[in-house]
Image: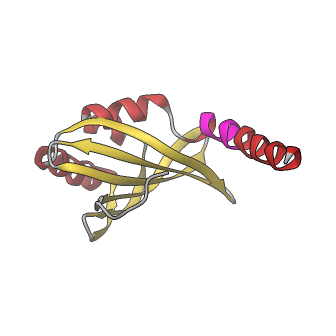
Amino acid sequence: MRRLITIFLGLGLLSASGNSQSIPADLVDALSAGKVDKVAVYFHQNLEMTILEKDYTVSKTQATRILKDFFKENPPSVFKVSFEGTKEKSRYAIGTLTTSGGDFRINLFFMDKQDERLIYYLSIVKESGYELHP
C-alpha cells in the first residue's frame, strides 16, 4: 500500500512540475476574457486549427479572425486548464472554456521558438454531457 501511495505522489509531483511550464498565465487570462489580440500574441506565424469540426491551416492573422468570430458567437467567462504535458519537443494543454453558448474543450499544442512559447495547433470542441471529466 505504501508503495502505491509513493507512486501516486511521485506522479503528482511530476505532473505539478510540468504544469508550471506549459501554458502561460497571461494566455489563460486572455482565453477567459475572450481577448483575442492577447491570445494571438502566442500564435505561431502559421498554425492549424480545428474549430467546431472545421479544419483550418491559416496564418496568424487569419487565426485571429477565426477565433474572434468564435468568441463573438460564444462569449467566454472562464478558461480552466485540466491537464498539461510534454511530448518530445512540444508541450500541450487541455482545458475547458465556459461560455454563454456552453462548455468547450480546448486543446493547445506549443512549440518553443527562440525563447517564446508559440501555439502551432488549437482545437475547440463542444463538450458533450457524456464525456468524463478528470
Q: Is residue 26 above or below residue 117?
A: above
Q: Is residue 114 visible?
A: yes
Q: Main secondary structure of the magenta part?
A: helix
In this rendering, is residue 52 above or below 19? Answer: below
Q: Is residue 92 left or right of residue 54?
A: right
Side (left or right) of 108 relative to 29: right
* Residue 60 relative to residue 16: left or right: left
Tell me residue 128's x, y (percent).
28, 62
Which residue is pictured at 67% across the width and 56% down the height? 89
Q: Residue at x 70, y 41 (%)?
A: 12
Q: Which residue is found at the position 47% from the left and 29% from the top?
A: 25
So how many labels did they put on this image? 0
Closest to the observer, 118 or 82: 82
Q: Position of residue 75 (x, y in %)?
A: 16, 40
Residue 39: x %, y % from top left: 35, 39
> Can residue 115 be seen in this snapshot?
no
In the image, the segment drawn in magenta is 15-20
Q: Residue at x 43, y 29 (%)?
A: 26
Which quadrant holds residue 62?
Answer: bottom left
Q: Residue furthest right?
A: 3
Q: Position of residue 23 (x, y in %)?
A: 52, 39
Indicate how the structure is coloured in the image: secondary structure
Q: Does 98 lie within the magenta span? A: no
From what the image shows, is residue 33 above or below residue 5?
A: above
Check the image and name the residue furthest to the front: 1
Q: Quadrant of residue 47?
A: bottom left
Q: Nearer the viewer, residue 119 or 3?
A: 3
